[in-house]
Image (spheres, rainbow, N blue to C red):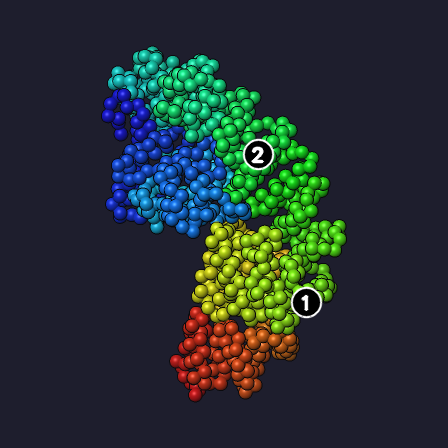
Amino acid sequence: MAPEHAEAVPSGPLWERDAELAAVTGAVDALCEGSSTGGLLVFTGEAGIGKTAVLRQVRRIASGRCTVWTARGGETVTSVPFHVVRQLLQPALVSLSAAEAREYLGDWYDIAGPALGIARPGGRQADPQGVVDGLVAAVSRLVTLHWPLVLVIDDAHWADQESLRWLAGFAQHLDELPVLLVVAHRDDEATGESARHLRTVGRAARPGTSLATLTAFTPDATAGLTRATLGPEADDPFCREVWAVTGGNPYETVELLAKVRGAGTEPVESNAAALRDLNAKARGRGLVATLEGLGTEATRLAWSAAVLGTNITLRLAAELTGLSAESAAHCARVLREARILSGEDDALEFAHPLIATAVYRSVPAAARTALHGQAAWAVTRSGRSAAEASRHLLEVHPDDDPEIVEQLRRAAREHLAVGAPEAAYRCLDRALAEPPLPETHATVLYELGCAALLTSPNGTVAHLRAALAMDGLEPGARIDAVCRLSQALVHLGHVSEAVQTIEREAARLEPGPDRLRLQAVHYMWEGIHTGEADALERSRVLREIAQPLTGRDNSERALLILRAFDAMTRGENAELVVELCDRALVNGRLAPGLGWTDTEWSFELLIMLGGSYLFADRLDRAEALFGEALRIYEISGWSGGHLAIAHAFVGYVHRRRGRLVEAEGFLRESLRLADRVGEELPMHWDAACMLIDTLLCRGHLGKAQEVAERYHFGPPYPSTLILPDAQSVRGRLLLAQGRTKEAIEELEAASHAAAETDRYNTVLAPWQLLLARAVGPRDPRRARELAADARRQAERFGTDTAIGEALRCAAALETGPRATSLLARSVAYLESSPGAYEHAEARVAYGIAARDARELTRGLALARACGADALAARARAVLREGRGLG
């Protein structure tokens, strides 16, 4: 397309952009007409290729028809959390009072509000994923106030990580919202997490229509733009040289033509040789030389603007350079005329990101550092937060300044409170380089380790070890550091090392609350460790420690929970398990300081409490406990791994109750949430194991196999205990696939593991029941021994589910009246248990064995209610045949 007249140089980059502009027009039309609920346009390409010009056209096309909000990443502000999303939403946020913002954002106000800068952060560290989800919800609600809405983000490759995380999440919801999202970025400059988030955004776009890579001008387009700019007399050799010099890059072409016109150069072949020199002045060192030629004061003002990065005001830039208001205004005019700066009145911005980059990189290192230091001072003096000043402090050279250390520590706390742990980590890492005073050095290391806990367990381990090796930590902080270090080691799979860490610290302490807390943490990690050396001795010691405890404080309550969990996994009497769990509560509820979002105790402890109830047939209490976790994590904005675990255990409560359809839904959501956190995490094992177990109950073998393959469900298993027992579930999967030999090998391995750890709960780990049926056809004697031993274990544990299932297994190894009698007893027990699926299985088996149509019909009704499709189909088939049924 050609510009309307020769003076329209700014439209030059839009030559050969007909397809892209047609896509923009179509997307805006669809949005305004209501024929589409939302849309996404992504434009990529190298620097200067015309992305910003296309986005300028987006704003023009949407102007007067839509609300348009814009934001831009900046090379010097990538360390500022939520910078881009705050820019984007600023028009909406400034128009809302605090009361209106709270009303529109609802439950998300306290979660997303601090990140947006419209609410004070709470007292605890915010969950980063929860904040991202809160921002997605907040923007979704604001959209309804400003429909139809166009969101435009330029230079997304320079957006901060927190905003990119939001952008990746928001892009998945566009089909539900009346909003057009338009994003531009350089596809070759984003790295690491930034690249990953932008790939996620790109996957939400449709290649060829809403995802376009802009290309350089062709020689014909370059010639057309040259003549449109300089006049029709521009000859062919001159136009070809313009294309050769610029490579068809739109920005360079426009800038070169502007310089040709400014110099009054005639566009003919004899002047073509001068083009290379003119082009050099528009980029790199040539641009810097041009800037320096404008004078010292103008150069210093440009430097200050480059250091400030975005939201540049003439007043603040002048303050950094020490210029008077009159001198600064004059320099700004000069820089605008030279096409280095743009903007009007007090607002300044660079004419193009390439210019901003060149100017920033041209500032001598010492001057740049000094300007960042002055900027930090100016921001702090203006009354803004330490977090706002921190991006400048990060650029200041270490100078043994205790005040800078304290400023950076304050900034880190502010970043953590709004859900930006990476930004907090950067501040504390920089504070460490200052360095801190000897009396605070260990504390800074401790804070650095805590900041890294959610994002870098390896970093947490290194920093906390260093902190513990130094003097200076307060006693409470030291105990907390040891506990957090052990937690990080467990998350990395180093359970034995975590236990040893706790043991060494406990040995330094006299008897008292701190030592008792460490003992509790020690037994907690041993309790979930599958490879502990002497499980029987640990159980004996734990039993002796817990025996006299009354639950007077949280350390005692923790030890009671650990004793209950140990008793449950070993298959001790279920009434004892429940009694120990109840003693750990206060009036039936979690004690203060021992809640799901409290950080003094790891949430694994409460998983043990709920798991003890879950496998001891007290599903009412397990459901209340895990339901509370789900509710608290949702309202607190903890939507990362914690919420994934909560969904998993709520789902497995449904599985144990026989609500298989509901269970599958919760467990799939758990895996979806876990996938957002990372890959091959411990939480994946539990959720995948539970989902496979549930799908096998439903009879959906193919789906169970898909989950197993996707999450690599099989040996080698992690060193932490999986609920339910992973080897038992995999053995059941192999049996369902007809891979009996492999199933027997898997279940025999489970047998050896149980012998080493003395864990014989037949509900948690039903390997004996499965192995008995697997070996029955070839080795009936061993099968009966296994079934008899499982029955003894079940009667020792004493729950209706355990005994009923053991009886059903025994019946499967018998024939005739003996099998029928055992099934009748199994039905009686399972009818009293909370396990509706197991009851349905036993009822169907009994109906078939007894040839009783009424019993089989009852079993069919139970199977249908549970969502056990294969079991229901089996019952229907027998009823349909009807042979021998009474």
Residue annotated with mark 2: 407
Q: Residue 243, position in %: x, y?
A: 36, 22
Residue that appears at 54% across and 21% down? 367
Counting from the top left corner in percent of width and height, residue 157 is at 45, 36
Which quarter of the rendering shows the C terminus? bottom left
Q: Quadrant of residue 582?
A: bottom right
Q: Position of residue 480 (x, y in %)?
A: 65, 49
Dot 1 corresponds to which residue? 758
SS class of the residue under badge 1? Answer: loop
* Mark 1 surroundings within 10 Å by alpha-carbon count, few (fewer than 14), some (14 through 19), many (20 or more): some
Q: Position of residue 172 (x, y in %)?
A: 40, 48
- Tell me the kind of residue under disc 2: Gln
Give the side of residue 839 with respect to residue 102, left or right: right
Check whether the beta carbons of the residues at disc 1 and disc 2 lie within 8 A of each other.
no
Question: What mark, if any, has residue 524 been given in the picture?
Answer: none
Q: Nearer the viewer, residue 437 or 254?
A: 437
Question: Which picture quadrant has residue 770?
Answer: bottom right
Seen from the viewer's position, the closer of residues 503 and 17 is: 503
